[in-house]
Every structure is written in C-alpha cells, then in structure tokens.
Amino acid sequence: MNLLNTLRFSPSFTIFKTKLTKAPRQRAFLSTFVFLILPACSITDLSTGIIPGKQEFKGIAVADDPHATLAAKDVLQSGGNAFDAATAMAFTMAVTLPSRAGIGSSGICQVYNPEAKTSSLLNFVYQGENTSYALPAMPRAMMALHAKGGKWHWESVLLPAEKIAKQGFAISQTLETDGKLFPEKFKDKNGNPLKAGDMLIQQDLASTIALLRSKGVAGLYTAGGAKHFMDTAAAKDITFTAEELRDFVPKWETPKEISFGNEAVYLLTESLTNKDVTALWKKYQNNETVSKTTEKMPVGAGFAVADAYGNAITCNFSMGDLFGTRTELSGTGIILAKPLKMPTDDLATIMVVNNNVNEFRYAGYASSFASTEDMLQTALQVLQGKEPLQINFETAENIPANSGAISCPKGLPTEPASCTFAVDNRASGYGYRVGEISD
C-alpha cells in the first residue's frame, strides 16, 4: 500500500477534556539516542494522525508535507518544545518539499511565547542586491528561531532531516506534481519522472545539513562553509560575497496587532504584505464582500505547531517560484531561490492569543495570491464560532492548497483537549495531535 495515501487529514476522532498537568522541563542535554529511539515505541494510526492510547498532551502540529508533521510529532513526543519541533519541521520540509521550502527559501515566522509574554515576527526574506538569485535564508533564520526558545541542542533537531535525506523518503503527491518542472533532478534510475510513493535519496543535501548541524553558522554563512558555498556558486557564474553571507541576519519585528474581544490577533507588518490587513479584518467582521484573485497557483509552503506549555509557531516559506531558479549547486543539494518582490501577498500567517491570561488560541498560514484574504476569513469564522475548524477547511472552496491551522478555542496550556487542526487536503498536508486521547 502506498504510504502517502494514508497520510491524509481525518476530522473524526474522539478527545476528552482533562486538565493539563504541566510536565517537568526536558533537560537541554537530552541524548541523541533517546531522541531517535523513543518515537519508535508507539504504534501510530496514520489515517487520522492520532497516537493510540492514553497519554499526556504533548502538542499539536500541521504542515504542507506529511514528513514535516511526523518530525514534529517525534520531537514533541520525546519532550521537545515548539521551538525544537519547528526547527525540525523546517529542515525536514527542506528535504521533502524543496520545490517550495528548500534550504534556499525565504520566509516569515510568527512566534508566541507565553512565558516571556511576547508575540514576535521573524522576517527572513532575502532583500539583498542580487536580483537574480536569493541568498539561502532559511538555515540562519531557523538558528535564530531555535535560539529564541529551543530546549534541545541544535544538533539534535537537525538529525531527522539529515537522516531522511540520506536514507530516502516516499515523495508526496505535491512533490510529484512539482517535480515535473525539474525533470532532470526528480527522475528514477530509468529516467522516468518520480511518482508519489517513490523513494528519493539526496546525499548532497544530507551533507549540507550535516555541516549546518555540526558547525552551525560556519556550515554555510562564515568560514569554510561560506567559501565552499561561494566556490560552488561561482562554478555556475553566480556571485555571492563573503560579506553578504556573513552579514545576513533575520530580523525580529513586531507584528501588526488587532483587538478581537479579549483576544489579540497578530498579522504581518506593512513591509511584508501589500494588503491593509486591518481594513480586511474589519470588512469580514461586518460581513462585507471582499474580492479575491485566485489566478496564481500557490508556490509556498508552511506549518504551525504548538506545545503543552502554550508556545506556538507558524511559518511560511517560498522559493519565489516552484524550485526557485531551478539552479542546483553541485555537491550541496541547495537549489537557489528567486528573490521575493517585497511587499508580497504570496505568504500569510496569523496568530491569536489572549494576553490577559497568556494563552494561545489560534495559528494559521496560507500560500497563494489570495492568501491574506482567505486566511483572515477562515480565522474569523472559527474565532466567532460560526463553523468548526475542520468543517471550515472542508467546505470553503476559496481556501488555497497549501494552507493549515491549529485552533485551541479554550486556550493552551490550560485546555489542550479543545485543540484541533485542519489542512487543505487537496494538497499533501497532514496534521498530528500528540497525546490526551482515549483508547
């Protein structure tokens, strides 16, 4: 049976409302052995994204690629937090969905940290002088994100992506479709296009991730890693300077905040989106019609994840086009992206929290030309209680492929039983809830 056929969202599952007992913090020096072995101890129902048996709630995740969601499940189940899980998801998706979220991608992340009582936005959209090729931004951004609140060592959270690149993975329906645009890379040993369920091994990419895992910034942006990257780019007559690599730093910014009853809704800043999101939100609240353009197909990919402590992260990535420039640097596995024209409407994220009680409520992402409008309308309908999250995603024809959300209407960390996920199942998205379910 094709594994990918089982990795679909199913809204039918039973949960029981119980009070969360806060687990002790995982030690930062959790061993790699424990990280790799513990997830194998449970039997997973891949048709629903639910781990059978009663267990304490550990978190919830949804992504545009099933392998990324399963990476988050393993991290959360083994004691990592949302920062650890998000980092593992990003690098896994760079392996399993390089057409939209590769090592070369730019993007944005929204982060809610209830312990620090902060909502912040990480902007890692490359805006350098090179107008043809974007500097790979994702790795350094994930370093910044993980440093913000990760519990595990950096090396541990990159191991899943390195392993799946080295040993291979079953490609998704999305990557099968995207791969037709890059046939010289995505073909089997007989030269035929890869199909969903076929195995893909990327040894060069595994080596690049291993360098980033073992050397951190020096694996790509400084020292020998930067020299190797510049040399391989120069072999294709592409110039990146040591100064540009060294000086690229993702920016932590303050997202746009809109009040919604007792909740605060956090959206992108004006520097990132062409849309006046405040005006759009008010129009939806007043049931006004908003025109939408759906001519452009989605070229981005994203995820959302929340842990038992109420930390929540949602990220959206883009290569500027499917497979970016379709230029792969020899020996690295890195496909260079196209620079994004900023501001952009191709990427959108949303985070909803209650700052009065420091609780997470909702996180979502969408990637399409009409992503801002679709995401805002979907979030508002759920927050107003008009439609459950799953039903909303199943019935709204305007929701673009490559979108997902997590909803905890009664709040995290206090009421984890209220948390659900949804993903547009016209693509290869997949969600997982770890813990607090019944036999």
Image (tube, rainbow, N blue to C red):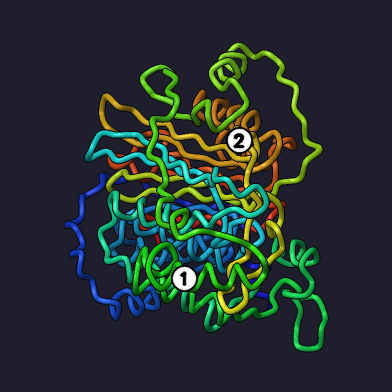
Q: Quadrant of residue 122?
A: top left
Tell which residue pokes out farthest to the bottom in this image: 190
Work out whether residue 390 can be spotted. yes
Q: Position of residue 24 (x, y in %)?
A: 17, 57
- Image vertical order of residue 317 relative to residue 37, above or below: above
Residue labelled with disc 2: 342
Q: Secondary structure at mark 2?
A: loop
- Left/right of residue 347 with respect to residue 269 in the rendered view: right
Work out whether residue 86 can be spotted. no
Residue labelled with disc 1: 227
Residue drawn at x 27%, y 47% is 309
- Left/right of residue 177 with respect to residue 21 in the rendered view: right
Q: Position of residue 223 (x, y in %)?
A: 37, 69
- Image vertical order of residue 397 relative to residue 35, above or below: above
In the image, 95 versus 354, the foreground residue is: 95
Three-letter code, disc 2: Met
In the image, 225 versus 74, the foreground residue is: 225
Which numbered disc, 2 or 1, marks the residue closer to the eye?
1
Three-letter code, disc 1: Lys
In the image, 281 versus 334, the foreground residue is: 334
In the image, 188 versus 104, the foreground residue is: 104
Q: Quadrant of the C terminus?
A: bottom left
Residue drawn at x 41%, y 59% is 87
| Label 2 or label 1, whichever comes before in sequence order | 1
Q: Position of residue 284 (x, y in %)?
A: 61, 18
Other-residue count near label 2 (Cα within 10 Å), few / some / many at <14 / 14–19 / ≥20: some
- Image vertical order of residue 215 relative to residue 123, above or below: below
- Left/right of residue 130 with respect to residue 51 in the rendered view: right
- Distance from disc 2 to disc 1, alpha carbons, whole Å, reads 29 Å
Residue drawn at x 55%, y 63% is 94
